Image (cartoon, rainbow, N blue to C red):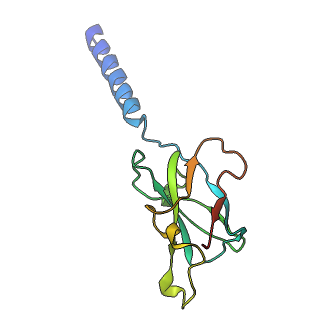
Amino acid sequence: MHVSTLRRGTRLVRALCLGAWLACVGCGERRMVVSGKATVDGKPLNSKLITILFAPDLDNPLKKIPFGVLDDQGNYTMSTGANGGVPPGRYRVHIHWDSKNAKGQPCPVHPKFLESGLTPLTIEVVANPSPGAYDLKFTRH
């Protein structure tokens, strides 16, 4: 084999490897585990009719909105579906109340928490949160 052919082949392999590496940079979006306790007026929010949602700020576009369900003690863990975890950033916290299955029960939180544009509750997802950083405090009034 001629030396110039070997050099071209080596350059081609290097270029392909570099291209593959550059294509993957950024494709593995970092995601954080977000877990906490949700309370309403200091008591555990434990309704199976509630889904917690994180609406990203405008500068944080997401393909899937992070969501979490509550257990009997008000604990939750957020997810983005199959991808798991939550990308770092600021979020407005609101809930979805399953009023169809509520059978006349009133929503256990103030209506302002039902819409991302009205909720006063925000959270910032970071790499090393302090203990309790993701605890959510809702009110009834």
Residue that extends furthest to the top in the rendered view of this protein: 3
As displayed, is residue 70 above or below residue 4?
below
Total marks drawn? 0
Nearer to the camera, 98 or 20 = 98
**Coordinates of residue 121 in the picture (x, y in percent):** 56, 58
Q: Quadrant of residue 17?
A: top left
User: Dividing the image into 4 quarters, which one contains the C terminus?
Assistant: bottom right
What residue is at 39 percent from the left and 49 percent from the top? Answer: 58
As displayed, is residue 107 above or below residue 59?
below
**Coordinates of residue 102 in the picture (x, y in percent):** 54, 86
**Coordinates of residue 130 in the picture (x, y in percent):** 70, 45
**Coordinates of residue 8 in the picture (x, y in percent):** 28, 16
User: Dividing the image into 4 quarters, which one contains the N terminus?
Assistant: top left
What residue is at 46 percent from the left and 63 percent from the top? Answer: 118
Residue that extends furthest to the front in the rendered view of this protein: 141
On the question of residue 95 being in view, the answer is no
Q: Quadrant of residue 138?
A: bottom right
On the question of residue 75 being in view, the answer is yes
What residue is at 45 percent from the left and 59 percent from the top? Answer: 65
As displayed, is residue 40 above or below residue 91?
below
Nearer to the camera, 140 or 76 = 140
Q: Left or right: where does residue 141 sit relative to residue 100?
A: right
Q: Left or right: where does residue 20 sit relative to residue 40?
A: left
Residue that extends furthest to the bottom in the rendered view of this protein: 103
